[in-house]
Amino acid sequence: MKKKLIGENVEPKCEYCLFGAAAPDGLTVLCTKKGVSDKDSSCKKYRYDPLKRVPRPAPEMLSFTADDFSLD
């Protein structure tokens, strides 16, 4: 059995497909199998490419002072 790289809950989207390339307008995907399609759709030729996913930005770090760590 193949081990998944990300998780079991990745929703199929043409945006993450191996056969798709982002169009210049940013709303559609140019697919080698189906042609032009919406980036949120998928088809039976869908194959996940983990390198096309953009990670979420890191959360903003909280700032602490020395008073936050004192027991007074």
Image (cartoon, rainbow, N blue to C red):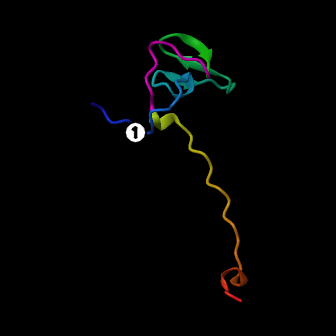
Residue farthest to the bottom, as pictured: 72
Residue at 60% x, 14% y: name it. Answer: 37
Quadrant including the N terminus = top left
Figure disc tally = 1
Magenta range: 40-49
Drawn side of residue 18 relative to residue 61, left or right: left
The image position of residue 47, as x and y in percent, is 43, 23
The image position of residue 49, as x and y in percent, is 45, 31
Secondary element type, mark 1: loop
Residue at 59% x, 13% y: name it. Answer: 36
Residue nearer the viewer, 48 or 34: 48
Residue at 46% x, 21% y: name it. Answer: 19
Q: Quadrant of residue 54?
A: top right
- Does residue 19 sit above or below 70 in this rendering? above
Residue nearer the viewer, 27 or 25: 27
Q: How many neighbours does mark 1 have within 10 angstroms: few (below 14), some (14-19), or many (20 or more)?
A: few
Residue at 33% x, 36% y: name it. Answer: 3
Amino acid carrying mark 1 in the image = Leu
Drawn side of residue 70 relative to residue 20, left or right: right
Residue nearer the viewer, 72 or 53: 72
Identify residue for label 1. Answer: 5
- Does residue 55 sit above or below 65 in this rendering? above
The image position of residue 29, as x and y in percent, is 59, 21
Chief secondary structure of the magenta portion: loop
Quadrant including the C terminus = bottom right
Based on the picture, tell me whether residue 58 belongs to the magenta stretch: no
Residue farthest to the front, as pictured: 72
